[in-house]
Image (cartoon, grey):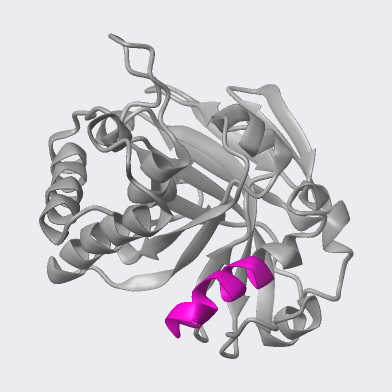
Amino acid sequence: MLTKEQIKIAADRLYEAEVNRKQIPALTLEHPEMDMADAYSVQKAWVDRKIEDGRKVIGYKIGLTSRAMQMSSNIDQPDYGVLLDDMLFEEGATLKASDFLDPRIEVELAFVLKKPLSGENVTVFDVIDATDYVIPSLELIAARCLRTDPETGYTRKVYDTISDNAANAGIVMGGRPVKPMDIDLRWAGCMLYLNGQIEETGLAGGVLGNPLKGITWVCKRFAPHGIGLEPGQVILSGSFTRPVPVKAGDTVHADFGPLGGVALNFE
């Protein structure tokens, strides 16, 4: 396991990478012994530093819950990251692509809670009961550490992604909110357009068979640490398409059919 000093240094490097907009090598290159506990400790140290800067936790994202995402990342298990208030952007906003490192867009369903939710035995029915509404969303992801090292060809590991706050960079919610029992969430679909052309399509059932299971997964993951989800928090259940790279001048539109659409622009 990494020492407290090594964890602090790693978190500081990720913090500075984001501030300076310059990617760093994967942490596992320097620390091949890093394990899951180390990775989440680095994530927590980085998030804590942001909270010290005045940021507030607004929820969590669950990543790598679909085969599409796992295959695109060469990773075979879900992860989670923390959503902070400065990551929330208005639907239709125009963002500077240069503010983000290797930015990409994912298609998700966001769950907004009305009741607390916690424990190892949380079921999909508990999630339904605790959810105020589900709403279409886009997640903007970024990579503070290099996905592939240009010099060695080394590909980052799941521990690098987790340390990097599960690649969190932004969330945009829009379209029509629905109660979780109003539709069969497995069949909520989306066509993702980039500059007017379809880049990806998918069904929310790609997320662990049902996006509700994404929420149960994070509850069970938090349970040993005494952490739970709180009313008002936003939980991204996981992408059901591969991440689509974006750059300055791009326009992204996610068409969720009867649930409406979500758009985002880059300059």
| Quarter of the rendering containing residue 13 | top left
Question: Is residue 18 located in the magenta-colored stretch of the structure?
Answer: no
Question: Could you say where residue 181 lies in the image, as x and y percent from the top left?
Answer: 85, 76
Q: Is residue 225 left or right of residue 96?
A: right
The one of 35 and 118 positioned closer to us in this rendering: 35
Q: Can you name the residue that lies furthest to the bottom here?
A: 115
Task: Indicate left or right for 124 with 132 as reference.
Answer: right
Q: State the residue at coordinates (21%, 44%).
A: 14
Vertical comparison of 107 with 221: above or below: above
Q: Is residue 229 visible?
A: no
Q: Residue 174: horizontal and vertical position, in percent?
A: 60, 57
Vertical order, 242 against 210 (above or below): above
Q: In front here: 134 or 66?
A: 66
State which quarter of the image contains the N terminus: bottom left
Q: Which residues are magenta?
A: 215-229
Q: Residue furthest top?
A: 151
